[in-house]
Amino acid sequence: MKYFKKLVGKEIYLSPMNPDDYEIYCEWINDLTTCIPSGVATNNYTLYQEKDALKKISEGQAFAIVKLNNDEVIGNCSLLDVNNIHGTAELGIFIGSDQNRNKGYGTEASKLLLNYGFKLLNLHNIMIRVLGFNQRALKSYINIGFKEFGRRREAFLINQSYYDEVYMQLLRKDFRSDLLDKQINDIINLS
């Protein structure tokens, strides 16, 4: 597949999504290690549904997460429900294969996307929702600077146990990352 380096980090880059990746996404989203933490384990996704979903998603602020060293797509991230009047959006992200999790790729992709949202889209407040049992994701979001602002208690039932849905947010003034600063400044100084 062909990817384009829209936002470049140290280990990964974000590229506009390629709807032709539907087969690998279908594999990931039907894998319990991906769909349980994402909260979609009760859904079955066919190749046709995933292809259609990727076409729709790719029309918004959605990006493939691609490794810099070999151009392998490993997941996606997006800004959903972007409101340009109020400067708000919701971040969504997942790393597809278990072999690429817990390596910092999701954190780096989130930081790149937040840089994009705050510095280029001029957003003010970006939120994320995460299931309470997903400790790895919670730790990553806290390290990035997200703060919990609420919980929907016992909102998710799996294996006869209820879990909270945690709501977190990050304001532009509280975001600390210089991942895109040099790139942006170099471009501005060329003009």
Image: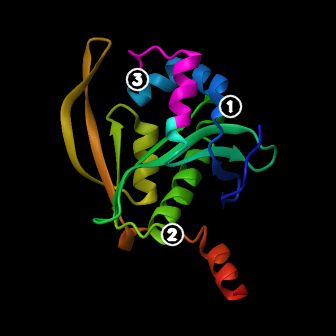
Is 156 located above or below residue 59 in the figure? above
Whichever of callouts 1 and 2 sits on the residue coming sooner in the sequence is 1
Q: Position of residue 26 (x, y in %)?
A: 58, 22
| Badge nearest the viewer, 3 or 2 | 2
- Identified by mark 3, the residue type is Val
Q: Position of residue 65 (x, y in %)?
A: 63, 45
Give the CA distance from mark 1 to mark 3.
Answer: 22 Å
Q: Nearer the viewer, residue 52 or 77?
A: 52
Which quarter of the picture shows residue 161?
top left
Q: Secondary structure at mark 1?
A: helix
User: What's the residue at 42%, 68% (across, down)?
Assistant: 175
Q: Position of residue 186 (x, y in %)?
A: 69, 81
Q: Which residues are magenta?
A: 40-55
Q: Which mark is residue 40?
A: 3
Can residue 181 be spotted in the picture?
yes
**Does 46 lie within the magenta span?**
yes
Whichever of callouts 3 and 2 sits on the residue coming sooner in the sequence is 3
Q: Which mark is residue 120?
A: 2
User: What's the residue at 69%, 45% (across, down)?
Assistant: 66
Q: Nearer the viewer, residue 70 or 49?
A: 49
Give the CA distance from mark 1 to mark 2.
Answer: 27 Å
User: What's the residue at 72%, 52% (across, down)?
Assistant: 4
Is 22 located above or below residue 77 in the figure? above
Whichever of callouts 1 and 3 sits on the residue coming sooner in the sequence is 1
Is 55 located above or below residue 186 in the figure? above
- Identified by mark 1, the residue type is Asp
